[in-house]
């Protein structure tokens, strides 16, 4: 069955008559976070009944929630067929200076969402990959993660937030539903999340990066690079055999980026595997000519992996080298480390406990 979250407003207007009802429903689901047709007071009974029979509304259930000491909250959602996915609400405090010159702290929300149950790509460092691929999420299942999290945290309808497609799954392997979710998120009459605030992270399916670029959606791009030579990258990300580093770089060069933005290259740092200065040097030459920024990520270990978390001093040396060569480089704070924040890790914990 389709869900009510699967549609853009234009589409909903075509299937619900009279069409102003579509706008009312958009208001209920995306501004008031209502997920029961009974509560839609201004919709006549017969319309509500018809909708109930055709479009599911309460499609995700929170089965587990873990709060980290830094304020991040990790969610485990169950889907209608019993499968589970994860999403994380990340909180960042931002300093803002008011017009009177007073320093104010404001909270900035970022939500990390999943695009698939499991993943086909099979990265050797990733817990999501261990369970194999189960199925794609529908556009509605992607969208509903944000609605549930906004409601659960009483985040007001007009508070802007950032979305990162960095949870479970490879968004470009679920191309159509992913693109549809971007369109629904940015719908002004709904969640109204600017496309500049939406970042897709991909393991680098070059052909689909090109395709996405041609759609000119106005979203941000992050590439999970993790290695600077094809031999190591293929060990970490087997799909690199089909889409090697150069093919990714070529696709990125064609991707339309906002004049003030950069493409993010994520570099997962694993102790003694890719944390050396020679790799940093190669990274510089690889990214030459691209408006790039690098985000270094600490490998987050889990039971059964032989990979190790890098030492902080090696991370800093790596970062300083990139910065000294003029590259913008940050280290991803281990937000929510105490709540097993890397992708797939909460789900795994649930499996061990049950
Ligand atoms: N499939 C997409 C998006 C989801 S994975 C992609 O690979 O980009 C999101 C990020 O989580 C990726 O950059 C991935 O490298 C990272 N990740 C996976 N396992 C991790 C781990 N154990 N520790 C830290 N980061 C991890
Ligand atoms: Fe899939 Fe991303 Fe995990 Fe690789 S890192 S297996 S692409 S979710």
Image: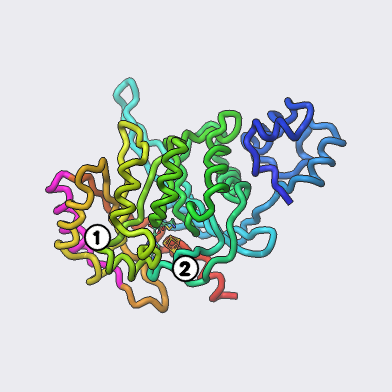
Q: Where's residue 321, x and y in %?
A: 14, 53
Residue 313 appears anywhere in the view:
no
Label 2: element kind: helix
Label 1: element kind: loop
Q: Where's residue 187, x and y in %?
A: 56, 32
The count of marks equals: 2
The part of the chain drawn in magenta is 308-326
Q: Residue at x 38, y 62 (%)?
A: 242
Residue 129 numbered mark, or none: 2
Asked whether mark 2 and ligand 2 are closer than 8 Å, the reply comes as yes
Residue nearest the observer in this picture, 257 or 319: 257
State yes or no: residue 314 in magenta.
Answer: yes
Q: Where's residue 310, x and y in %?
A: 26, 67
Q: Residue at x 47, y 39 (%)?
A: 161
Q: For residue 311, which quarter of the picture?
A: bottom left
Would you say the magenta stretch is mainly helix, strand or loop? helix
Q: Residue at x 39, y 41 (%)?
A: 220
User: Disc 1 marks which residue?
Assistant: 228
Q: For residue 84, which quarter of the picture?
A: bottom right
Give the quadrant of ligand 2.
bottom left
């Amino acid at each position: 069955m389709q869900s009510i979250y699967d549609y853009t407003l234009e589409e909903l207007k075509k299937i619900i008559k009279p069409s102003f009802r579509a706008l009312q429903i958009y208001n209920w689901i995306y501004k008031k976070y209502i997920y029961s047709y009974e509560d839609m007071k201004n919709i006549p009974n017969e319309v509500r009944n018809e909708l109930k029979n055709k479009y599911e509304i309460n499609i995700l259930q929170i089965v587990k929630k873990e709060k980290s000491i830094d304020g991040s909250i990790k969610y485990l959602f169950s889907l209608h067929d019993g499968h589970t996915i994860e999403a994380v609400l990340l909180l960042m405090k931002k300093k803002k200076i008011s017009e009177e010159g007073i320093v104010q702290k404001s909270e900035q929300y970022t939500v990390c969402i999943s695009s698939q149950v499991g993943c086909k790509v099979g990265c050797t460092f990733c817990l999501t990959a261990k369970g194999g691929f189960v199925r794609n999420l529908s556009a509605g299942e992607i969208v509903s993660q944000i609605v549930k999290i906004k409601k659960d945290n009483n985040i007001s309808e007009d508070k802007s937030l950032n979305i990162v497609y960095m949870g479970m799954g490879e968004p470009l392997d679920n191309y159509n539903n992913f693109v549809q979710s971007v369109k629904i998120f940015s719908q002004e009459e709904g969640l109204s999340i600017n496309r500049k605030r939406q970042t897709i992270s991909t393991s680098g399916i070059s052909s689909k990066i090109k395709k996405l670029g041609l759609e000119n959606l106005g979203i941000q791009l992050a590439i999970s690079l993790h290695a600077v030579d094809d031999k190591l990258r293929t060990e970490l990300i087997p799909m690199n055999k089909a889409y090697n580093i150069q093919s990714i770089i070529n696709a990125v060069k064609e991707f339309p980026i906002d004049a003030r933005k950069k493409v993010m290259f994520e570099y997962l740092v694993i102790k003694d595997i890719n944390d050396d200065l020679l790799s940093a040097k190669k990274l510089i030459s690889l990214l030459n000519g691209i408006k790039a920024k690098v985000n270094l990520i600490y490998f987050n270990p889990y039971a059964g992996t032989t990979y190790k978390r890098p030492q902080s001093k090696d991370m800093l040396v790596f970062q300083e080298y990139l910065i000294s060569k003029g590259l913008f480089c940050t280290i991803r704070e281990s937000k929510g480390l105490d709540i097993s924040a890397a992708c797939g890790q909460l789900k795994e914990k649930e499996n061990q406990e049950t």
